[in-house]
Amino acid sequence: MMKVEPSRARKNRVTLLALIAVFAMPPLLGWLFIMNPEWLPSETVNKGVLVHPPRPVSGLQLIDAESGQPFDWNQLRDQWVFVAINHGDCEQRCVSRLINLRQLRRALGAERQRVARVLILLPEESGKAAELPPMDGLEGTQILHTATGSVAGDTVSLFELNQVEASDHLFIIDPRGDLMMRHNLKTLKTKEILKDLQLLLKASANWVQGE
């Protein structure tokens, strides 16, 4: 039986390890960036505000407006999620924001399949439940609302709505189900937000797809 020379065996092992590294690094880096978004290069998130540490949303007990049943956040697992939040009825300004989010998602091209859209409706200060918006042209937007005042309070706390105006912001949930970023829709241009999102999707592509 032919013996392999030690030097050749070492070379073969090095080659094998190099190949493993080449294929393993992209998903590993994507996973690390998702776990630690603050590690992302500054040019990747120079417009959005990072939520650090990321906050899991799975504990929010919201109601699916369509089915009337408790919403299972696992439905959105492995997707990036655009979240809009509105106090009270979703009237013209709210609808316009949803249309803008739809257009922003479309601008991502093929990558849009990795992005979901959610509208969370919070009750008015009087406690009156918010009415649903007309959905013409907004199909695909998941609409959720709170069942109790305590859940509304939990939502305000998690999204820090005592510090930022809900109607002015786009919130981002990562594929692990963590709130990790927000963008100010009043002060940022659409192309600035789009650039951030494109870079995030690129950085996480292999990890999300499990490649």
Image (spheres, rainbow, N blue to C red):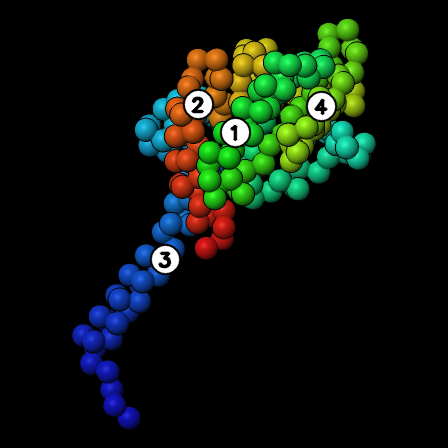
Q: Which residue is mark 2?
A: 190
Q: Secondary structure at mark 2?
A: helix
- Tell me if mark 2 has few (under 14), some (14-19) or many (20+) residues whose alpha carbon lies within 10 angstroms of its own: some
Comes first in the chain, label 2 or label 4: 4
Comes first in the chain, label 2 or label 1: 1
Give the answer, above or below, for where 97 lies relative to 16: above
Most distant residue in the top direction: 126
The numbered disc on residue 103 is 1
| Viewer-side residue, 120 vs 105 | 105
Three-letter residue code for mark 1: Gln
Q: Which residue is mark 3?
A: 23
Q: CA distance from mark 3 to mark 1?
A: 34 Å
Give the answer, above or below, for where 129 lies relative to 14: above
Q: CA distance from mark 2 to mark 3?
A: 34 Å
| Viewer-side residue, 16 vs 96 | 96
Q: Which residue is mark 4?
A: 134
Residue 19 relative to residue 30: left or right: left
Q: Where in the figure is residue 150, as x and y percent of width and height?
A: 74, 18
| Viewer-side residue, 49 vs 83 | 83
Three-letter residue code for mark 3: Phe
Residue 63, quarter of picture: top right
Q: CA distance from mark 4 to mark 3?
A: 47 Å
Number of callouts? 4
User: Which is more foreground, mark 3 or mark 1?
Assistant: 1
Residue 35 relative to residue 44: left or right: right
Residue 38, quarter of picture: top left
Give the answer, above or below, for where 27 lies relative to 176: below
- Tell me if mark 3 has few (under 14), some (14-19) or many (20+) residues whose alpha carbon lies within 10 angstroms of its own: few
